[in-house]
Image: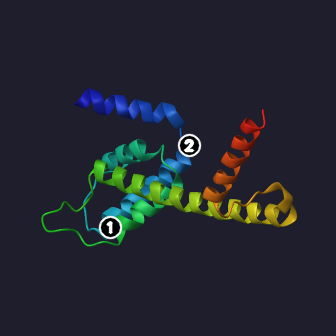
Amino acid sequence: MAAIVDQKAKGAVLSRQPNRQFKTWLIGKLAEIAMAQQAVVDAETLQYFAEMLSTSEPQDLLAATSYFCHRERAQGETAFPSLPALENAVKDAKNKRLAVEREQQEREDAVIKAKHFAEHPEQYVVIKDFKALLRELMDEVAKRKASR
């Protein structure tokens, strides 16, 4: 188990190599969680958690730490969240952020498409009754075959 954790820590370090200032900021955010949840957490734990989470985007980390600072703990839950709980909160924040970004991009694309349609309607074919069009095409094919 320790080997897996060490391997994950090395992977986190190699993948992004965040700067010292970012890790210091992250340790501060983790300390805020500890204060808000009235947890006693040593500096080594904060540094380890910061190392493990340091490959995440700052906005996702901020959302996750805010979540843990502003929620009530469940009965029997530890004061300071586990690393997997923090990682899941970061992942949830990332998924929400990406969904919002995707929706925004879709809205922007729709505006661009609507503008293009308004400026170049000749490039678009609107089929009101597909079945009728298909019948017409089939009739035309049948006429051409009959005329041969």
Residue 116 x, y percent position in the rendering: 81, 61
Q: Residues within 10 Å of mark 1 (few under 14, many from 20)?
A: some
When the figure is inspected, residue 63 is found, relative to residue 70, above or below; the finding is: above
Q: Identify the secondary structure beneath mark 2.
A: loop
Residue at the image position 41 percent from the left and 52 percent from the top: 91
Q: Residue furthest front?
A: 147
When the figure is inspected, residue 47 is found, relative to residue 74, above or below; the finding is: above
In terms of image quadrants, where is residue 19? top right
Residue at the image position 76 percent from the left and 57 percent from the top: 125
> Disc 1 versus disc 2: distance between alpha carbons?
25 Å
Residue carrying label 2:
19
Is 28 placed left or right of 20 in the picture? left
Residue 64 x, y percent position in the rendering: 40, 60
Is 128 placed left or right of 95 in the picture? right
In terms of image quadrants, where is residue 130? bottom right
Along the line of sight, the residue nearer the viewer: 117 or 137: 137
Along the line of sight, the residue nearer the viewer: 110 or 12: 110
Q: How is the image coloured?
A: rainbow
Residue 74 x, y percent position in the rendering: 19, 68
Q: Amino acid at mark 2?
A: Asn
Q: Identify the secondary structure beneath mark 1.
A: helix
Q: Amino acid at mark 1?
A: Met
Residue carrying label 1:
35
